[in-house]
Image (cartoon, rainbow, N blue to C red):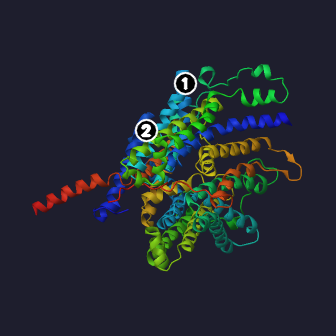
Amino acid sequence: MNNNNLPTWINVLVLPLLNLILAFAIAGLVFIAIDVDPVEAARLIIEGALGYEEGIGYTLYYATNFIFTGLAVAIAFSAGLFNIGGEGQAYIGGLGTGLVCLALDASMPFWILFPLSMLGGMLFGALWAFIPAYLQAYRGSHVVITTIMFNFIASSLMVYLMVNVLKPEGQMSAVSRLLEESARLPFIHDMFGWVGIELEQSPLNASFLIALAALVFVWALLWRTRWGFAIRALGASPSATNYGGINPKRLTVIVMLISGAMAGLLGMNEITGYSHQLRLDFVAGYGFTGIAVALIGRGHPIGILFASILFGVLFQGGNELAFEYDNIDREMVVVVQALVVLFSGALAMMLVNPVTKIYQAVSSRQAKEA
Amino acid sequence: MFDTVILLLDSTLRISTPLLLLALAGLFSERSGVVNIALEGKLLASAFAAATAAYWSNSVWIGLLAGIVVGVITAMIHGFASITHKGDQIVSGTAINMLAAGLTIALGRYWFEMGGQTPALVGDQRFTGITLPFADALADVPLIGSLYSTLLSGHNLLVYSAFALVPISWWILQRTRFGLRLRAVGENPHSVDTAGISVTWMRYRALMIAGVLAGIAGAYLSTAHAAGFVPNMSAGKGFIALAALIFGKWRPVTVMFGCLLFGLLDALAVRLQGVELPVIGEVPVQAIEVLPYVLTVLLLAGFIGKAVGPKAVGTPYEKSR
């Protein structure tokens, strides 16, 4: 992506920031179009997301999901694979977590159940990514199209399972039974309570810590191991890896498995961390938001952390905004998100030429003055 | 039994129409080398625009026009990002899908205060069925009567137009100079460029056609098939159309059969709800709903024939230096 003559700090900080500002500016116009003062809206969003303890809890709880799905997209993308199936992988991953818990929560203590449910989520998420990955690597079917198809297949499968299998007898809504205590992750406010610090209640739970660990894991994997080097080499030039003695087909499958496993971890935050039951549509678009997160985060774990918090702010703040104005609902957040994807992703290179010109003008003037 | 089949095929035609228009839209853009996973968003945005304009102007024709205009605008955003600025075609497509999902609800709520719906369309705000000549007179004739007057007659103009567009698209792509160049741009843009034809302009024109077709599909959805706009009413049709496009191997006539097949499955899913079939028992609706996606994956995997898309599809064109 950096095939221009700009210094790194402009490529990594200034350009993404300018793209983000453009996206927010257009979003501001949309707010004006629906008679909402954009400055007031921004104030409400920031205050609602960061202005009080419970708000911060919600913000980080949403951010947890975005870290998982953002990492999923970023890992695949670093190998040149566009995994658009995070939504389905997270859905089926959640199913894996839920099934493990539903089967074992009566007979197992937390410390055995917790790693098992986490593995269940990763395994199911990886499995859902495996088929498109295998087909891409060995049968040449494009991973973008197959992962889109698998999102829809996942969604139908879940409706079937929730309505016909997992819904307890005699209950109207399509949700599973509540999980026992042994399957539930501790909330962060509980954990602080153990050491005597009082926090307001929020859905933020131990999954957030796992998400942070996942960020470190992915960073170490991609930049500190031979495998990571091979993955990035595959992304940079698929033909080069052939010469390097790495089997690009096998690597494609492995990368997608890791990607799917990351998306699968979302079930931990939603099911064992928050709602304590399997529900329909618990993925709620987080998989697609992961694309935006990975794009603004430039595929780097630190960037993904910041981008996840940014989207956490937008989600939580957007809820508060919807509460404040009756003509706004959470869909405005989707609009902002879409503009971010458009400007930070599809139009990422739009500003390269003007910025290069400005940079050259400024640096040549400095050279003259010196 | 015969009447049931006729009714089933009748609803198949209605369900296939937006799929067909969208798949043809995808056909033009992908044949020119631009992947069109934005069909879903284009459909949704046009459906909203058509319903809104038809309601305000009291004319379905203004609605159709608005749908087409919005279809072209979204296509131009897609083109601006993926042709002019060489952005990733899939990322820009995803952005358009999200933008349409968010904006239609945001604007709908602001304008109509009905949770994102438009008010119900009535009278001249909708496309209504056209009774073909002699349909009433022939209705009582056995077999031919119901075949002609129920299955073929009584659809609205957009249904007939969609199916008429199949041979027209074929002719444009296969028999005109424009079509030849358009296909060449999708297969080998360098050679087209060498011949002095602008790759950029060809792709923009292909996307404009796609925008018009997607706009008609949107107008059909909200002003002909339904009586008004409902949030997320596209419900994955854009992706089913994409599946049909792949299933039909990027060729107009086979794409049409793909759309009819997927339309039939959808119509069957509605009819078979809760019905006990001999031997297999009750088929879950989801199992039928999911078939287009499964079939497409199987096709892509090469288990039923082989789907090979245009060679240059998905890659922005860079003049080699």
**Residue B61's x, y, as percent?**
54, 24
Give, as a three-letter code, the residue at label 1.
Answer: Trp
Q: Residue A31, labelled with which disc?
A: 2
Tell me where residue B257 sits by quadrant. top right
The chain letter for the residue carrying disc 1 is B
The chain letter for the residue carrying disc 2 is A
**Can residue A319 be seen in this snapshot?**
no
A49 or A340: nearer the viewer: A340
Q: Is residue A94 above or below residue B106?
A: below
Q: Is residue A173 above or below residue A305?
A: above
Residue at mark 1 to residue at mark 2: CA–CA distance: 30 Å
Q: Residue at x 41, y 54 (%)?
A: B191
Q: Residue at x 10, y 64 (%)?
A: A370
Tell me the quadrant of the picture where the N terminus of chain B can be found: top right
Identify the element where label 2 is drawn: helix
Q: Residue A20, labelled with which disc?
A: none
A349 or B172: nearer the viewer: B172
Tell me where residue A348 sits by quadrant. bottom left
**Residue A151's x, y, as percent?**
62, 55
Identify the element where label 1 is drawn: helix
Q: Residue at x 68, y 74 (%)?
A: A112
- Residue identified by numbered label 1: B61
On the rendered structure, is B245 left or right of B70? right
Give, as a three-letter code, the residue at label 2.
Answer: Phe
**Residue A38's x, y, as percent?**
40, 40
**Residue A240's x, y, as percent?**
44, 73
